[in-house]
Image (cartoon, helix red, strand yellow):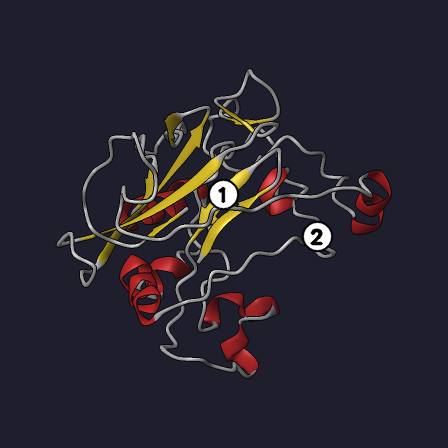
Amino acid sequence: MDIWEANRAATAYTPHPCNANQVFACQGTECGNGDERYKGVCDKDGCDINPYRMGERGYYGVGANYTVDTSKKLTVVTQFYTTDNTANGTLREIRRLYIQNGKVIQNAKVNIPGLEKDDSITDKYCAANKEVLGGTDHFTQLGGLKQMGDVLGRGMVLAFSIWDDAGSYMGWLDSTYPPDADPATPGAARGPCPTTGGRPAELIKQFPEAKVVFSNIKSGDIGSTYSNVTARAVPRWYRQ
């Protein structure tokens, strides 16, 4: 479960369900490598919401002109809603909020012809995303949000990492991907970065002092981990 994949130019959150229900070491086809990508036990593509990719290019980025200004401190909120509004229900929706300058910022709505103006991840959104933008719907094949929720319910470790990408150069997050795609094609442009960028060796030279600060990590029922904000009072996991 990719709670938050981001840099200052682009962001996404992405559930990746697997049909293995315990700690599992894959072998051969199970690993889904190469041409067997969609035969593995996990959905490597996942179902993502990336505002830039979904047509809202002025939502997230550096500067006051963006709805979420990544040059300033911000709080990332991820909410997990269930079908019966209890901590033991079936996962039905994953919602994203930001808090910045004392204000709650709702996630950007999808703005692509053929897709509804969703602003959260649901099974319906994920299926429509693949149908309109193309690709194999491995997410649904492997159980979708129900499977993702079952795994979360058994317990997962919240991990933080800072990383580069020697294979795809993070293009799947912040550039046109695949790099030979027409950026005018809906869903191809995931961020404003050039397809020639993102090379690890170049990044290290360009940004030797690059850093990020993660702080004040909280978990609890929805709406319980931030104050003076109106939120839907539905018990379920909450990550901030």
Number of callouts in the render?
2
Where is residue 67? Give x, y as percent.
48, 22
Q: Is residue 22 above or below residue 206?
A: below
Q: Residue furthest left?
A: 84
SS at mark 1 in the image: strand
Residue 153 occupies which quadrant of the picture?
Answer: bottom left
Where is residue 4? Give x, y as percent.
49, 47
Q: Is residue 167 above or below residue 195?
A: below
Side of 202 where 26 appears, left or right: left
Side of 212 where 125 appears, left or right: left
The structure residue drawn at horizontal position 84% and vertical position 39%, both measured from the top left corner, is 206
Q: Is residue 89 above or below residue 111?
A: below
SS at mark 2 in the image: loop
Dot 2 or dot 1, earlier in sequence = 1
Which amino acid is tagged 2? Asp
Pointer 2 local density, CA inside 10 Å: few below 14, some 14–19, many at least 20: some
Image quadrant occupied by the N terminus: bottom left
Which amino acid is tagged 1? Ala
Q: Residue furthest top?
A: 65
Q: Nearer the viewer, residue 162 or 227?
A: 227
Q: Provide the residue designation for mark 1.
A: 12
Q: Nearer the viewer, residue 22 or 98?
A: 98
Query: Distance between the Cα atoms at labels 2 and 1?
Result: 16 Å
Where is residue 47? Give x, y as percent.
42, 51
Residue 203 occupies which quadrant of the picture?
Answer: top right
Q: Nearer the viewer, residue 127 or 134?
A: 127
Q: Provide the residue designation for mark 2.
A: 164
Q: Is residue 194 above or below residue 2?
A: above
